[in-house]
Image (tube, rainbow, N blue to C red):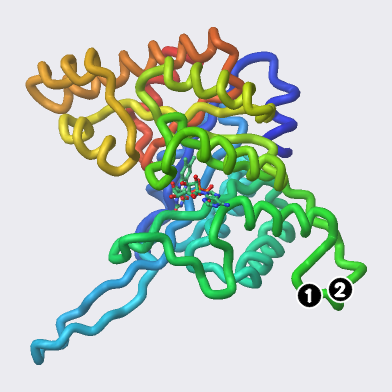
Amino acid sequence: MKVIEHIQRATQTLFTFEILPPKKGENINTLFSHIDSMMEFKPSFIDVTYHREEYVYKEMGNGMLKKTVTRKRPGTVGICAAIQNRYGVDTVPHVICGGFSKEDTENMLIDLDFLGIQNVLILRGDPVKSESGFVPHPDGHCYASEMIGQVNNMNRGVYLDEDLPEATPTDFCIGAAAYPEKHFEAPNHETDFEYLKQKVAAGAEFIVTQMFFDNQVYFRFVDQCRAHDIAVPIIPGLKPMATLNHLTVLPQFFHLDIPDVLAKEVRKCKDNKQVKDVGVAWCVQQCKELIDFGAPVLHFYTMSKSELVKRVAEQVF
Ligand code: FAD
């Protein structure tokens, strides 16, 4: 079933979470045991992230370095299919522009369609770690809105090859990402809203937000979206803080603010066990307020570790 149908049929706020494919060479059973432990909360759908290629430099032994390209977490499509088959839960594979030509995208979408996967979250993707800015594939897309347009075309039976006038339309429900605290490259909130609106105009039917720790940020963001005529459901992204290190790492990687009260509570903790208790209590409070506000779904960033999200879900769902 499509994400949008789950939301339309729901009588209460839904639960969902995001997982990462295992690192290359790791066993999938660890991931399954993580999912197993979340099934009691009846996730409506599960997101699976996509990880683009990275450049790795290997010592050649003669003072020279050899640049190789590797994908450390392959398997997004296979995992989505495996989850739908094993648990009967809908999946939302993330599909990114980075490293993909338009044809690669079309072929991935054909695979997803054949596998019965009806949802996609379309993203631009971050720059390759060794590059300072995002460089699109020469035959690919620069922005998520362009790729959303491609998926929407396929939903109308329009494929890249013009010699396929009778092509079978796909039927994907398309999601897009948004940043209540602004995307780090956007010059200001206003342009970010314009581009978000473009994504919805291109065919995005739901939005998932970057994580935030201050609900006011989300409430304000929803109001601003509505003021910009962005009417689709906006799913808040959440993550319980787990380590003292998160106080610096999360703002650095995800370009967000940690509220002062939370930062002070975390700094008082003697060890990460105490940080986890603080993180869970904070996240539970966030969830309760978001449910009262009428958030359609709560989306948890698990980083493929279920312990804390499970503790939160036990108190909320
Ligand atoms: P876009 O919407 O394309 O926007 C990127 C930037 O360009 C923004 O600053 C925007 O304001 C600007 N912009 C947009 N359109 C235009 C235009 N037409 N002209 C000029 N500027 C424009 N990354 C992964 O690699 N894999 C994942 O699985 C993944 N999952 C994610 C899930 C969620 C819920 C979120 C919030 C992020 C995820 N990311 C993932 C990270 C994401 O790829 C990065 O944040 C990326 O930098 C932006 O992606 P986007 O789709 O929001 O980009």
Q: Position of residue 56 (x, y in %)?
A: 27, 72
The residue at 63%/57% (across/down) is 147
Q: Where is residue 81 in the image (x, y as percent from the top left)?
A: 61, 53
Element at label 1: loop
Question: Where, by quadrant of the figure, is residue 251 drawn?
Answer: top left
Q: In this view, does 179 lie above or below 135?
A: above
Badge 1 vs badge 2, beta-carbon distance below 8 Å: yes
Ligand 1 within 8 Å, label 2 CB:
no
Q: Position of residue 143 (x, y in %)?
A: 55, 55
The residue at 53%/57% (across/down) is 96
Question: Where, by quadrant of the figure, is residue 311 drawn?
Answer: top left
Marks 1 and 2, Cα distance to the nearest angstrom? 6 Å
For the residue marked with disc 2, what is the amino acid?
A: Leu
Pick whichever, 252 or 239, lies toward us: 252
Q: Where is residue 307 in the image (x, y as percent from the top left)?
A: 33, 30
The circle drawn on residue 18 is none
Q: Residues within 10 Å of mark 1 (few under 14, many from 20)?
A: few
Residue at the disc numbered 2: 164
The residue at 57%/58% (across/down) is 77
Pick whichever, 216 or 70, lies toward us: 216
Question: Where, by quadrant of the figure, is residue 278 drawn?
Answer: top left
Q: Residues within 10 Å of mark 2 (few under 14, many from 20)?
A: few
State whether residue 41 appears in this view. no
Q: Is residue 97 above or below residue 312?
A: below
* Residue at the outermost right position: 166
State whether residue 142 appears in this view. yes
Pick whichever, 151 or 242, lies toward us: 151
Residue at the disc numbered 1: 161
